[in-house]
Amino acid sequence: MSVGLVILVVVAIATVGFFIGRARAVSSVAGDVRQLHSLPSYYGQTVFLFSAVPALLVTLAWLLLQPLYVENQVSGIILPGDIAEGSSLDLVMADVRRISSGLDTAVAAGVLDKNALTQLDASQTDVRALLGDVGVALASDVHPNVFAAAREYRATTATLKGAMAAVAVVLAVLGAVIAFARIHPEYRARNVSELAIKSLLILSSMVAILTTVGIIFSLLFETSNFFRMYPARDFFFNLTWNPQFTGGSDLGILPLLWGTLYVSFVALIFAVPIGLLVAIYLSEYASRKVRSIVKPAIEVLAGIPTIVYGLFALITIGPLLRDYFAQPLGLGASSSSVLTAGVVMGIMLIPFVSSLSDDVINAVPQAMRDGSYGLGATQSETVRQVILPAALPGIVGAILLAASRAIGETMIVVMGAGAAAKLSLNPFEAMTTITVKIVSQLTGDTEFASPETLVAFALGLSLFVVTLCLNVLALYIVRKYREEYE
Amino acid sequence: MTDVTSGANMAPKPKTSLLVQDARTKRRNAAEARFRTYGVVAITIAMLALVGLLSSILYNGSSAFRQTFITLDVYLDPAKLDKDGSGDIAKIAKVTTFGYAPLIKKSFEAEFEKSGIGVDGMKSKDAAKMISKEGPAELRRFVLAHPHMIGETVTFEFLASGRIDGYYKGRVTMKSAEIDKNVSPQQLQLADQLKAAGLLETKWNWGFLTRADASENRPEAAGLGVAILGSFYMMIVVLCLALPIGVATSIYLEEFAPRNWITDVIEVNISNLAAVPSIVFGILGLAIFINFAGLPQSAPIVGGLVLTLMTLPTIIIATRASLKAVPPSIRDAALGVGASKMQAVFHHVLPLAAPGILTGTIIGLAQALGETAPLLLIGMVAFVREFPGAPPEGFFDPAAALPVQVYNWTQRADPAFVERASGAIIVLLVFLLCMNAIAILLRRRFERRW
């Protein structure tokens, strides 16, 4: 039974339980519902919840834990001698999973039948060719023990899946029966079902915490693996980034960090003055008509996905900067450069800066403007000497948030900044950033045992920490230095 | 006591007039005008950037929706396709795509004879290269679907090769063809003749929206079908998970949560998650969903789960705002007539907040639809030619996604893929526009002010 079917069956049992429970409550008072503690459908609801929720939760937990258990069982079959030089147990287990899913495909395609599979001996049959026939390509010939492990893996998985379906259905029925047996006129069905619903609400609000915990743990876990293979000192202080998949690579974060900061700096230089001036003009000078056109247009800019900006950098801004600035000035011949990515990212950040500063500027009370005008100041003097100082903490917060966005931005730099890790000052040169390298180290065929792949997690952790610090700092500045009016 | 300087020591006051500006006023007014100009310049730059962005995409991408087709009469030669004349589909299927290429060559020869077109010194072999490499494969699919047509002559519409197509879109010129090994000036001349004879036509191309992706050297056959379907599956997953979880979380935080440190932790968490870079969610998806839970790579379910986690903060923030907007008098009235707290929330507050929640959800979905970076890490960059199956199993099949398809195409060498990528962006933007328009309509139609 597939997982979808199990869920459907459980929900069906629970729904039937709802109607039976409701009917029992009504019949227990011979149709006079006023004698019930709660409305009849609450009795049905208790049956539904008792039946569906435990069964579905167990299914979910089972799905998460099953692969762990199966792998533990199966990895015993593989002896240390089966692991090839330069390989690891993880890699062999990945092979086992591939072969086992390949066997599934083979059985489904009818190339193999179930009885033949149990007789199959990898030392005599060419399993690789067999699986190649059904479209599962394997990198190397299959070792007999690995094949045995794969067969065991497949069998255990199938057994456990059946067991899961059985357990879920039994739980659903059991829950329904228990809830059903408890129905009598004095049963406080509404309180029980409301308590259950409230627990579900609390449970779902835990998802946010679980996500954060998941992010932190997955980053920390793989990063500690990385630092076991590659010294932390080199990672933080080495000045070269030169991953070699044959080993002996230099994985220093500094060139990437420099590229990230340089691109973000260019973006902020571009976005902050423009965004700020746009916000000031819109809130202090613009007529209602201009506002009604410009504001939605800026919001459109904010709603455009970053991949669009990336393409814009790649096909328009990059060649433009190269042909009209870099080449005539003799500064470079590459269309992907720090300036390309920076300018396009700056465009992306304009709405971000302007809408955040718009909020802060509008929060400055009108009385302060009026006071300034009353003393004879012009509008620009009021803006520069009264409004901006009053709104400064908010604006600094907005800039920090924009910086955090710029540092974490991926698609624009992947498509606009280039891939060469360099420590250079020339803005027309291609440089690379932390996010670009995360993408390039983790896409394609990845094996999770080499430092060249795991470094992406260390980079991710650095990125996470830096952006988190910027966000917290921004919030802190806004809270601490906010002038309270009224 | 104040010191009053005696009038005798004061310099005679310069004569001023309200009608004539003095130097200082002039300076201040000039500064004012300058400042205003800065504002106008800033707005102009922002608007120019928007216009430049959109027009560059439209300019490069709109041609992707049109494609050049060549119409030919092909004789389905039984001697080539069905040697023993048995009509057995298994035997016909043994003829590979290569076996169909000569048929196209033959039909060019027939065409040259019939209508007298042709370029000196050009062989039918070179003419056949004007047809997309996908052409023979399409012909084969047609024959396998209609085996009884073998032996007859069918009129077939082939995709022209990417270079011929580029010639009619201005990408390829006679000059560039001279140094291009994939196309020759003779082929372009022949194409012009075919066009004059009405056999070659550039027209609207549904295939761009319905076909699967195609390999590096046949950009003309690449389409968005798999990507659109994959994105659609992911949106279903996001909607089914993010909406209930988001609404439940917001109801708890807004209506039931006691003010204590646990609630504070949850709230800080949510606002932090909203600011975490999207690529970190990709790393999470790779580590938890693929490596730990063993879900398949490039499957819409994994993409949907990752995007759900990313969209949750957006939905929660929107839902809480619209729950907050429902006045307390509604709750008080419900409690007053004997409803429980749960009943007050679910029967009265939630329906009133529904339009706001829906609007927030659609905006969250629109964000998720355009998100690329996390999908790159969970293997959605893989080259997928097969359409995923029907749900729910289809959620676990490999698929592409719209924004990732754009990225994929930009990484390929043939310039025809740039046009495709921009075209895909137009499709993406149209989807986003529709979603946002629905959100705005909903807000206009159902928004209540209290």
Image: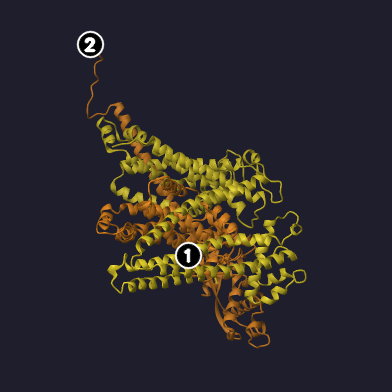
**Residue A455 visible in rendering:** yes
Q: Which three-letter amino acid code belongs to the residue tagged 2?
A: Ala
**Chain shown in orange:** B
Q: For the residue labelled by badge 2, is the local secondary structure a helix, a strand or a loop?
A: loop
Q: Position of residue B276 (x, y in %)?
A: 49, 48
What label does residue B255 carry, if any? none
Q: Residue at x 72, y 64 (%)?
A: A146
Q: What's the coloring here?
A: by chain
Q: Position of residue B285 (x, y in %)?
A: 55, 56
Q: Are marks 1 and 2 in contact (CB under 8 Å)?
A: no
Q: Quadrant of residue B364?
A: bottom left
Compared with B442, A486 (above or below) is above
Compared with A378, A36 (above or below) is below
Q: Earlier in the sequence, mark 1 or mark 2?
A: 2
- In the image, which is nearer the foreground, mark 1 or mark 2? 1
Give the class, few, some or many, for how many residues have Cα within 10 Å of label 1's Cα (few <14, many ≥20).
some
For this view, does B133 lie left or right of residue A371?
A: right
Q: Which three-letter amino acid code belongs to the residue tagged 1?
A: Phe
What label does residue B8 carry, if any? 2
**Residue B211 visible in rendering:** no
Q: Chain of mark 2?
A: B
Q: For the residue labelled by badge 1, is the local secondary structure a helix, a strand or a loop?
A: helix
For this view, does B160 lie left or right of residue A357?
A: right
For this view, does A243 lie left or right of residue B264?
A: right
Pick whichever, B299 or A299, lies toward us.
Answer: B299
Q: Position of residue A209 (x, y in %)?
A: 48, 51
**Chain shown in yellow:** A
Residue for badge 1: B232
Give the quadrant of the N terminus of chain B: top left
Give the CA distance from mark 1 to mark 2: 88 Å
